[in-house]
Amino acid sequence: MNVLEFKEATIRFGGLTAVAPLSFVLPKGQLAAVIGPNGAGKTTVFNLLTGVYAPTGGEIWFEDERVASPNKSLKPHQLAARGIARTFQNIRLFGDLSVEDNVRCAFFNRANYGLKSSLLRDAKYFEREGWIRDEAHRLLQIFELDNRKDTLARNLPYGDQRRLEIARAMATQPKLLLLDEPTSGMNPSETNATTEIIRQVRQQFDLSVLLIEHHMSLVMNICERVIVLDGGVKIADDVPQAVQNNPHVIAAYLGEPDPELDEAIAHGEAVA
C-alpha cells in the first residue's frame, strides 16, 4: 500500500517553475529522503504536501484520497487531521511555553471535549486533560526531554529544540512524518543522537517518514530510498548506494557539465 503519491504535481510562480511535473510513490512504512542542491525545490515539495501551496498542475494523493489538485486542495489543518505532520527548517517552537506545553498544545485535535466541558471543567474535561498530560510525558521520555519538561522552549539547547519539534509533531499521531532538515545546525554528536531517534520513532510508531537533509551520512545510514531534485526536476530516485554513484547527481552537486541534465531542467522533464 502506498501512503503517498505524487502524480505529475507541478507548481509555478508566474514564469518560474519551482517544481516541474513530479511523480513518485511512498510505500507505507518507508523512510525516504528528498535531497538536492540549494534551490532544488525540496521545501516547496513539503509545502505542497502540507497545503501551504496548491499545485498548479497534477495531483497529490494520501492514503487513496486526493488531497491536492489545481481545483481543490485541503488546508494545512485538514491534512494534519488526516495524519500528515511536519517540522520546519527554521525552528518554530512556542518559545515562551514550557517543553511540556509545547507538546500538549499539539493534542488539540485529539482533546475530544467541547467548549461546554472546557468552561465547566467537568469530569470529561479532567479525564481527557489527564490523558493528554500522560501522553505528553510519554513522548518526552521517548525524546529524552522529560527532565526538562518545565523549561521554557527558548531556553533549550539547539539540539533539544530540534528534538522537541519532532516530539510535538508526533503528538498529532501522524501516519506520515515530514522532517525538514532535522539535523540542521547540529554538531556530530547531536546529529548521531537525532539519527537514532528518527530510526526509533519510525519503528516504534510504524510511520512513513520523508525527510529533507544535507547530512549525507544520515541519509545513507537510515534511508531506504533517496529522491534527488535539481532545478525542480527529479534527476534520481533509487536506493542510497545507486544515488551516490549516479552521474547526474554527482554533476548537480559538483557543478560539473552535464548536457543531458541541463536539457532536462530547461524543459522541466525528469531524468529518473
Image (tube, grey):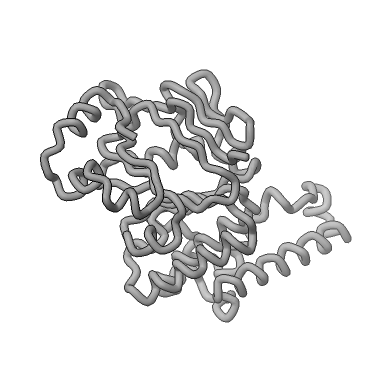
- Expressed as whole percent of the image width and height from the top left, the position of residue 51 reads 50, 35
- Expressed as whole percent of the image width and height from the top left, the position of residue 97 reads 54, 65
Q: Nearer the viewer, residue 194 or 103?
A: 194
- Expressed as whole percent of the image width and height from the top left, the position of residue 212 reads 39, 51
Residue at the farthest top position: 71
Residue at the farthest bottom position: 147
Question: Where, by quadrant of the figure, is residue 122 drawn?
Answer: bottom right
Question: Residue drawn 43% across and 31% down?
Answer: 23
162 relative position to 139: left or right:
left
Up-down: is 184 above or below 259?
A: below
211 relative position to 168: left or right:
left
Question: Where, by quadrant of the figure, is residue 167 drawn?
Answer: bottom right
Question: Residue drawn 41% across and 71% down?
Answer: 159
Question: Residue drawn 57% across and 81% down?
Answer: 147
- Marks counted in the figure total 0
Quarter of the figure that contains the N terminus: top right
Quarter of the figure that contains the C terminus: top left
Up-down: is 119 above or below 264?
A: below
Question: Residue drawn 20% across and 44% down?
Answer: 252
